[in-house]
Structure formats: C-alpha cells, structure tokens
Image (cartoon, rainbow, N blue to C red):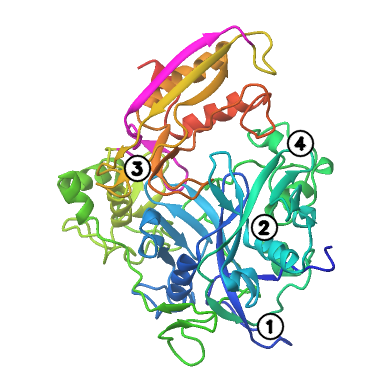
Amino acid sequence: MAAALGAGSGSAGPPGLPNSVPGHTALPAVAVWEWQDEFGRWRPYRGSVCSFIEQALQAPAQKGRRSGAGLASSSIPLGQADATLAPYVIDIPSLMQFRQDTGTMRSVRRHLFAQDSAAGQGIVWEWQNDEGGWSPYEMKVCVFLEQAFTHGLRHVDLSSLGYNYDIDFVLLVQTNKTSRFRRGIQRRMDTPYPVTTATGPLHTAVACSCQQCLLNSGTGPITTRYRHSMINLPSSSAVPQVSSWTAALSSSGLGFVPYNKPTLSGARSAPRLNTQSAWALPQPGGAGGPSPGLSASNGVSVPNLPVEMPKPSKVNQALAVSPNEHEQVVRKYLEELRGAPADEDCIICMEKLASPSGYSDACECKTIKPEAVGQLTKCQHAFHLLCVLAMYTNGNKDGSLQCPSCKTIYGEKTGTQPKGKMEVSTFTQSLPGHQDCGTIQIVYSISKGIQGPEHPNPGMPYTARGFPRYCYLPDNEKGRKVLDLLRVAWKRRLIFTVGTSSTTGESNTVVWNEIHHKTEMDTNLSGHGYPDPNYLDNVLAELAAQGVTEACLRQ
C-alpha cells in the first residue's frame, strides 16, 4: 500500500531563504500551514487562513524589517484572516504560533502538496471526536485517504504514516488496531489551499526519507496510555519509529514527550532556522517584483492584505481603563535599561533590542519611547517596553505579567473563565493505580452566556459544551493537595477559558485552559483516565506554571 499510494506532500521553511534546488524545475503546488497541538498532532489551518499567511509572506517588506534577514513579514497576526484567531500570531523566524493573552507557544510548519491533491481540491477528511464534533486529520493523511478513496479501495492502514488506525471507507469508521475502539470519519469539501511554486521535488511515496521530511515532517498520535505521563515513559524500542521530533527523541531513548511546550531559557532561546538551509518559501514578490495577490487555476485568489497588529485602544475603551494604568503595570515589574544589549533579540517582536520596537506603529504610548528596553526584575529577561505593553493590553489586563521567555509570573495571574460552579464529593471506590484510597469527584458546571470585555469577542455569545464535566482524583494526601490548588485556580478563573476547541474546531466556546484533568475512572485508553502514575506530578507542574503553588495555600 505504501508503495502504491503517495502522500503527495513536500515541506518548506520560511521565506527569504534560498529558493532553488539544483536539478529541479519549478512546479505548481499548494501550500498548507499546520500547527501542533499538545498531543503532538498536526492540525491544518483552514484554506483561507493559509492564503492569508502566504500573501503576508509575499507582501512587500514591512516597516522595521531587519536588513539581511530576507523576511517579508516576521510576525503574522492571524486575527486578520479569521476573527476567532485574534489572540494568535505566527512568528516566522522561529516557526512558532504565539498566543498573546496566555503566552502559549506551539510549533507551526508549511507543507507543499500536489495541485491535484486533496489540499488543492479543498477536500478534508475528518474524524469524530469525543464531543461529537469533527476534527481534521493532518493534511498528509487527508491526501493519502483521498488517493485511496478515489482508487476505490475499501480499507487502508495508516501505520505507514505513524498512526495506529485502520480506515474502512465502506462503513466510514476509523478503528484503533490496539484497543479496537471505533470512530466515525467523514469527507468534506472546503476552501482549496493557495497555489505556490515548488522548486524541489514533491513526495512520491508515503515513507519519504528526503531531508525536508526528516526535518519538518509530522508525527502520528502518541501512545494514548502515556499521553499525560512525563516520566517513566516506554523505551524507544516499544515506540513505532515516526518522523520529526518524536523520532529524534525516540532515537535517544527518551520515548514520547506528551506536551509540545518549548522551554525558553533566555531572550535568544527561541528556535531559529539555519539560513543556509535548503528549505525555501517564495521570495517576496518573486523574480517579477511584488505580486498583486495569489491566483491560480484551483479558484483560490488572495487579495493583498496589510499585515499589522491591531491597536489596543478598542480593548481599552471596552474595559474603561486608562492606558496609564497599563504603563504602571509594565513599569512595576520591569526596570528600564540605559543601554540595550546589542546582540540580543526581543522575542515578542523578534527585532534586535538595539532597534526600535516592532510594535511602535501599533501601540500608542506617550511616555514610553520605541527604543526603550526593560528588564524583568526576577528573571532578568529583557524586552522592548512597548512590546511588553502591547502584550499586556492584548491580554487579560489583571495587573500581572508573565515572562514570555521563561514563564515567570509577576503578580497574581487570573484568567477569563466564565461564571460557573465547582462541586466536590468523595466516595469509597478506588481508582486504578490507587487501590489504597477512595476517590475525589469534582463536578464543573458552566452555562452558555455572553462574552465579556476580557474574552476574544466581547458581546458575542459563547457556548458551553459537555457540562457538567466530571473529573477524578485519588483521595490521598497528594490528591487532596491537588484539589486545594484546583480550588485556588478556579477562584482565579484559570481552569477554563473562552476560545476555539482543539477537538471540534468550534470557536467562541468554553475550553480547558492548559490544566489537565482526568475525566474517566476505569480506563486510560483515551489518555484521560487511570492508571497514570505521573498525572498528579504533571498537574502540579501545570498549576505552578499558572502561578498556583503551595505558597498560595499559606496565604
């Protein structure tokens, strides 16, 4: 099967890099951008969002572009393509998606597919998630499934793509080959992805070993039993060899890493691309000068769109808060430096600290100069003061700051969780792996409502799917400590937020907020139950990342 059906994709890095591969002629292709969720799965952005990203990359150089970097736009605000993605910015040099209100960073990638593939035709294959909605497969799987479907095959095995699933096109079901758990699948038409030019070869087989795939390919789903375990992972010999970072870790004996949360140790720690790499996106404007827009035979036409950050004045008006109060928060936690480090970058705007802030044209402030640089008092990481101000005014504006580099919290961090109820009870039945104690049951109840000024779309309704939600902890000393800290997190509105569901893709809905809960008692086949010997330690670490520690219990 692997030899008969090709995935039909290639991969490429950011623009401005050498765009020619000796011996290969330019071929039409479609570009698909994807982001990596906390389980290591790649999720494609919609075709319209990918078109916006491609257009931004080909637009004339933006104000403040660093000379010699070769980037048309170093950061791309996705809210201009889709209002539900307003908090998200893609940083091109590091290939990271940055969420401005929470500081969460996720990897992104760009893949090229044949123009006659599923991506070029706007065909998306999806699987039914636990909430009854539909989640898209990563695009290389969609392409593979579409090829098999059009060839009239009845069954295909996804193991060649790193997935432990069989697909039945007759019954339209996906079956886990280990647990035999079945899910529905569907084929859906959507907006075709934007056309570009591929100067290197596209894939001709599933198990491609070209340099681009080894460096920038996707991974299959992680073994669900270990989804929430950060230590005592299975040895690499027990893990299927897949590509990208999973394969790199497996080869060194570390096994799977469950959460893709980069740890940044300094202002220059954001991952960078090698400028000598053979990866390439189109040069801005191409050889013929700036393009008026992308257009191709598959019907995708992308107008020129400006790329700039929205000014925070609308948010300020909604909150009725003086901008001076925002500046006071910034100056409370940062000390202004007299001389900026010449060789360091501001990881918020990705400009040199010695250069003016990249947000100087999007953040109005009379008392902070564009070239002003400040250093956080505890962790000593340095940023443009205007960049920190822009990050704060686009966030929760609760009087606290979180270092975007090391995640150190200044002040008391609060969230945007809607109003609701948290109820706790206990019973004698034990959880698997905790036979020496009873069980704590937590019930969260949140109803639908109207978004406030702190939410992505103030004044619009939000939904609350799947409530009440039942969660479980062992009724032992550590479990009770986690419960006490969850109570603190609940009061600080940190457990849920309003955003876009990573499983259903629904926007303006109540979603979990990076503090994982166990929602099943008797099995861990889904990764959301027991036994999981490392869960309590993991959730304590996640709570600490939100500023909720044992010190809070002593206050």
| Horizontal and vertical percent position of residue 93 | 51, 65
Three-letter code, disc 2: Gly
First of labels 3, 2 by sequence position: 2
Q: Are marks 2 and 4 in contact (CB under 8 Å)?
A: no
* Residue highlighted by disc 2: 218
Q: Are marks 4 and 1 in contact (CB under 8 Å)?
A: no
Q: Nearer the viewer, mark 2 or mark 4?
A: 4
Categorize mark 3 by other alpha carbons within 10 Å: few (<14), some (14-19), many (20+): many
Q: Nearer the viewer, mark 3 or mark 1?
A: 3
Q: Give the side of residue 165 with respect to residue 324, left or right.
A: right
* Residue 21 image label: 1
Q: Are marks 4 and 3 in contact (CB under 8 Å)?
A: no
* 319 drawn magenta: no
First of labels 3, 1 by sequence position: 1
First of labels 4, 3 by sequence position: 4
Local SS, label 1: loop
Three-letter code, disc 3: Tyr
- Residue extent of the magenta highlight: 400-429
> Which residue is at 56% across, 11% downward?
477
| Horizontal and vertical percent position of residue 554 | 39, 15
For the N terminus, give its image quadrant. bottom right
Magenta stretch: dominant secondary structure: loop
Residue 141, by quadrant, is bottom right
* Residue 462 image label: 3
> Which residue is at 69% across, 11% downward?
435
* Residue highlighted by disc 4: 179
